[in-house]
Image (spheres, rainbow, N blue to C red):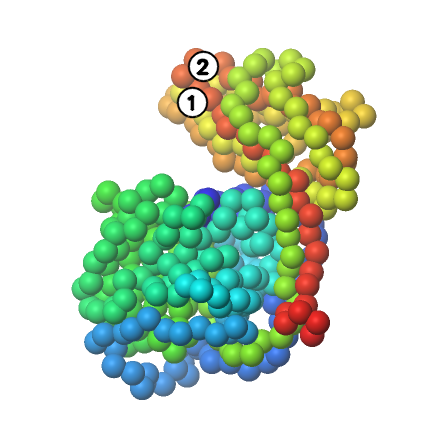
């Protein structure tokens, strides 16, 4: 799962108000760094006509914000390893690390040193094609889509636009002063991240997250039918995450869970009626309590042979860790 889908998941969760835990503060750590306030950025002392791949170091840290659907959260992303041909990026933000643990966020985890390409399930996502030059084009695969990318020189670096078919899919940039992007936006959905400064030798507290897939499938049995699906939550978890997406031309859906004690758990996707005209689709992700034992899925219900829903459930355990270790 890459940048686009994980962003959808993030804003869905934020909109539902489901994760109530306080994320580790992005301001925890040393101060300083390079500002990217447009009012104070000086003329860059580099030749922007051709920009080579930068070198990152363990402890390099980018400070920024995630935004979308009326919410903005601060975060820090840190180079925690530089081994072999790859860097490793981790974050102070619990939600970012949760979705990376579940779905493999393309701009966290393994980053290829030769071109800063991210990875989705061991497949590279080529954000940049170095050396960057005005008008340079290349193609990359993001979230299973072939994206055509074009770089355009600006006073600060390069703006990069990615198109799928005839529609703009993503817009971001490369800023030599930051040695990475200052913005990444998924245009149609109106969400993304911004980076405002970078610093070297960061120390502080990172989020530490492990996730385990408990269930995935496409149940299509009628509402209230036990056995449409089941999963077992382990002891010692922080929360579970249920993701539901799909749809069809004419359908009614409901999503109910039975907790291990047999009591119903009503999700925020409890009951939705489709409009009579035109297709209707849904993408919903939410937290459920980490009650150990066997849960049962009683839905969704589908009233159209051409419709369907995909359901996945993860258990998540969260914590924090010092960086560098022992600091």
How many neighbours does mark 1 have within 10 angstroms: few (below 14), some (14-19), or many (20 or more)? many
Question: For the point 50% across and 35% down, which residue is it?
Answer: 283
Mark drawn on residue 6: none
Q: Measuring from the top left, give residue 61's x and y in whole percent.
A: 52, 72
| Cα distance in 3D space between marks 1 and 2 | 7 Å
Check contact, mark 1 vs mark 2: CB within 8 A: yes
Q: Position of residue 157 (x, y in %)?
A: 30, 73
Visible residue check, residue 69: no
| Residue where numbered disc 2 is placed | 304
Eyeballing the image, is 326 above or below 107? below
| Residue 291 horizontal side relative to residue 125, left or right | right
For marks 1 and 2, the one nearer the N-term is 1
Quadrant where the C terminus lies? bottom right
Residue 2: percent from left, percent from top: 44, 48
264, above or below 76, in the image: above
Residue 292: quadrant of the picture: top right
Q: Taking 143 as reference, is 23 left or right?
A: right
In this view of the protein, which residue sits in the foreground, 247 or 132? 132
Graded by Cα atoms within 10 Å as few (under 14), some (14 to 19) or many (20 or more), the crowding at tag 2 reads some
In terms of depth relative to the viewer, which is nearer, 48 or 301?
48
116 left or right of 318 in image? left
Q: Secondary structure at mark 1?
A: strand
Task: Residue at 34%, 64% (x, y): give it.
Answer: 115
Q: Which residue is mark 1?
A: 248
């Amino acid at each position: 799962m890459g940048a686009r889908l994980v962003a959808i998941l993030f804003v869905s969760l934020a909109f539902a108000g489901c994760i109530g835990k306080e994320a580790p503060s992005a301001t925890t750590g040393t101060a300083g760094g390079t500002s990217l306030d447009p009012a104070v950025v000086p003329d860059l002392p580099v030749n922007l006509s051709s920009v080579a791949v930068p070198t990152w170091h363990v402890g390099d840290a980018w400070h920024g914000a995630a935004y979308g659907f009326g919410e903005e959260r601060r975060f820090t992303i840190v180079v925690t390893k530089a081994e072999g041909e790859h860097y490793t990026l981790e974050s102070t933000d619990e939600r970012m690390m949760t979705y990376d643990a579940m779905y493999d966020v393309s701009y966290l985890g393994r980053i290829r040193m030769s071109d800063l390409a991210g990875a989705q399930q061991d497949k590279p996502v080529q954000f940049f094609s170095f050396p960057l030059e005005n008008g340079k084009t290349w193609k990359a695969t993001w979230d299973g889509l072939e994206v055509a990318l074009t770089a355009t020189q600006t006073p600060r670096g390069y703006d990069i636009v990615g198109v799928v078919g005839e529609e703009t899919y993503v817009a971001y940039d490369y800023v030599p002063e930051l040695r990475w992007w200052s913005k990444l936006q998924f245009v149609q959905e109106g969400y993304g991240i911004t980076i405002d400064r970078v610093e070297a030798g960061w120390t502080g507290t990172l989020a530490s997250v492990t996730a385990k897939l408990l269930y995935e499938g496409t149940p299509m049995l009628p509402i209230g039918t036990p056995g449409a699906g089941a999963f077992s939550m382990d002891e010692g978890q922080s929360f579970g995450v249920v993701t539901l997406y799909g749809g069809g031309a004419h359908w009614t859906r409901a999503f109910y869970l039975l907790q291990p004690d047999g009591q119903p758990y009503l999700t925020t996707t409890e009951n939705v009626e489709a409009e009579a005209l035109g297709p209707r689709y849904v993408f919903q992700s939410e937290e459920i309590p980490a009650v150990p034992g066997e849960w049962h899925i009683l839905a969704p219900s589908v009233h159209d042979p051409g419709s369907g829903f995909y359901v996945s459930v993860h258990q998540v355990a969260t914590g924090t860790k010092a960086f560098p270790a022992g600091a």
